[in-house]
Amino acid sequence: MSAAAKGAGRDAELHTLTGAYALNALGDRERARFERHLAVCPACAQEVRELGATAVRLGLAATEIPPSAMKSRVMARISTVRQEPPKVAAAEAGRIPPPVHRARPTGRRRLAGFVLAACVAGLAALGGVAVVQQRASDQARAEAREAAELAQRRTQALADVLTAPDVRTRSTALGQGAAGTVAFSRERDRAVFLASGLPRPDDGRVYQLWFADGGSMRPAGLLASTGSAEALLMEGAVGRATGMGITVEPAGGSSAPTSEPLGLLSFPSG
């Protein structure tokens, strides 16, 4: 198979990941790959929005319990319908007497069988709907709890840096009226970047943060700018970083800067 054909197959596979992405069921590498695809595929972006909204509605849905009298009605009906005896080889060979069949109109027997089948199918369907809805509801609630706990941990991590006894800050203009501030703590070994007025990047592009380790730049997270004030806990430890920067990169980020930095901020020593 040619490289072009393999690439086309991988691209086609990405279209099938919308449901897993909407439910946060992708691994880190697969999620990053799908997000790069999402930035250039309006159809998948729309489907993710719709699936996400559906998941929320399922989480709020009430389960539908079958009527309490349905089971008793089905069981009562079963008792009035004669079960056909098993056909065993001995009976067919004449070694045991064949079962005695009571005369019954064929049409009536078939009608009774249809009624019984309909009752059982209805009960199974209602029970199945209740089970599926309950599982979907439980899963959505669990995911909501996990998201809330993650948001709480991130908020706490931001607060730990901003309230650290040794916290230091540096600010710079980022162009077009935007500004950026970095707050870092050597004691906590973490840094927070705060942006204000940063416009949305062009389609298929993101803002990426970097730690400056001497002459090299280390990825430190992506900033999903909405144009309003934002605060992001930078990924990774401050370590021996002497500063940080922000660039515009392709969706999903880069392993090294591919554009000139919008801003560079130095970390004072000591």
Image (cartoon, rainbow, N blue to C red):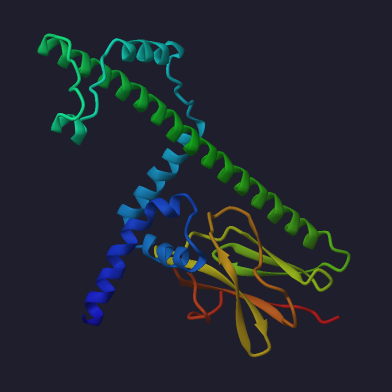
Q: Compared with residue 8, is residue 138 higher up or lower down, i.e. above or below?
A: above
Q: Look at the image and tell me whether residue 201 can be seen.
A: yes
Task: Determine whether 64 is above or below 21 in the image.
Answer: above
Residue 264 visible in image: no
- The C terminus - image quarter: bottom right
Looking at the rendering, in which quadrant would you find the N terminus? bottom left
Kindly indicate the quadrant of the structure image that contains residue 143. Answer: top right
Out of 25 and 175, give the one closest to the viewer.
Answer: 25
Q: Quadrant of residue 198?
A: bottom right
Q: Nearer the viewer, residue 101 or 236?
A: 101
Instruction: Please indicate whether residue 150 sits to the left or right of residue 205 in the image.
Output: right
- Taking the spot 51% from the left edge, 31% from the top edge, the residue there is 60
Residue at 41% across, 27% down: 127
**In screen coordinates, is 257 left or right of 97?**
right
Instruction: Give x and y (percent) for residue 256.
Output: 53, 82
Residue sitting at the far bottom: 215
Residue 80: x %, y % from top left:
29, 10
Q: Residue drawn 44% across and 50% down?
A: 22
Relative placement, left or right, of 171 versus 108 is right
x%, y% of residue 7? 28, 74
